[in-house]
């Protein structure tokens, strides 16, 4: 049997509802991150509208949607911030909580968590959170 567009399995991106759902997840995610006193400091001088757009594009790629991201690499964007593992884990926890709250299926959640593990070394570089 030949796989056609009609018989191809849906991507995670399609299964959760596409761009509209990813945007809703990113908005809820950043609401959680910005409300976290240990993390909010990373975003005090960040254009949050632009940040949310970048995150939508990156999460879309992670979920198997179209790759339209043209921004900096994860390492380029995050290494100068000296992010400690503790803060990376907190951000991952907020993303997991957001996706769980939005009833994202467990297999998709597991795949997102796997990607978080794979990219950790590109984001984490600092040991002392006091520099935030």
Image (cartoon, helix red, strand yellow):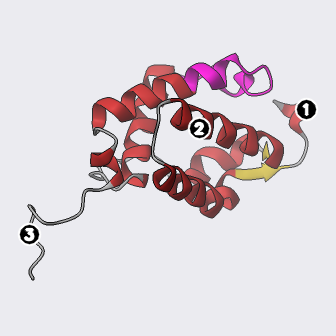
Q: Position of residue 124 (x, y in %)?
A: 74, 52
x%, y% of residue 101?
Answer: 54, 30
Residue 99 or residue 31, whichever sits in front: 99
Q: Which residue is mark 1?
A: 130
Quadrant including the C terminus: top right
Residue indicated by mark 3: 4
User: In screen coordinates, is 130 left or right of 15?
Assistant: right
Q: Is residue 33 left or right of residue 124?
A: left
Compare marks 3 and 1 and give the one earlier in the sequence: 3
Q: Where, by quadrant of the figure, is residue 96 drawn?
A: top right
Q: Is the N terminus in the top left, top right, bottom left or bottom right quadrant?
A: bottom left
Q: Residue at x 43, y 45 (%)?
A: 59
Q: Is residue 118 visible?
A: yes
Q: Please state which of residues 40 and 65 is positioned toward the viewer in this rendering.
A: 65
Residue 9's place in the image compared with 130, above or below, is below
Q: Magenta segment range?
A: 30-47
Mark 2 neighbour density, 10 Å: few (under 14) some (14–19) many (20 or more): many
Viewer-closest of 89 and 84: 89
């Amino acid at each position: 049997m030949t796989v056609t567009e009609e018989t191809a399995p849906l991507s995670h991106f399609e299964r959760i509802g596409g761009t509209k759902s990813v945007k809703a997840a990113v908005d809820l995610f950043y609401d959680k991150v910005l409300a976290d006193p240990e993390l909010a400091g990373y975003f005090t001088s960040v254009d949050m509208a632009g940040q949310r757009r970048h995150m939508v594009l990156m999460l879309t790629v992670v979920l198997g949607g179209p790759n339209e991201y043209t921004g900096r690499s994860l390492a380029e964007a995050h290494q100068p911030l000296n992010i400690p593992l503790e803060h990376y884990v907190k951000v991952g926890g907020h993303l997991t909580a957001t996706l769980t709250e939005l009833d994202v299926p467990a297999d998709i959640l597991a795949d997102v968590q796997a990607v978080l593990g794979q990219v950790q070394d590109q984001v984490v570089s600092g040991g002392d959170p006091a520099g935030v």
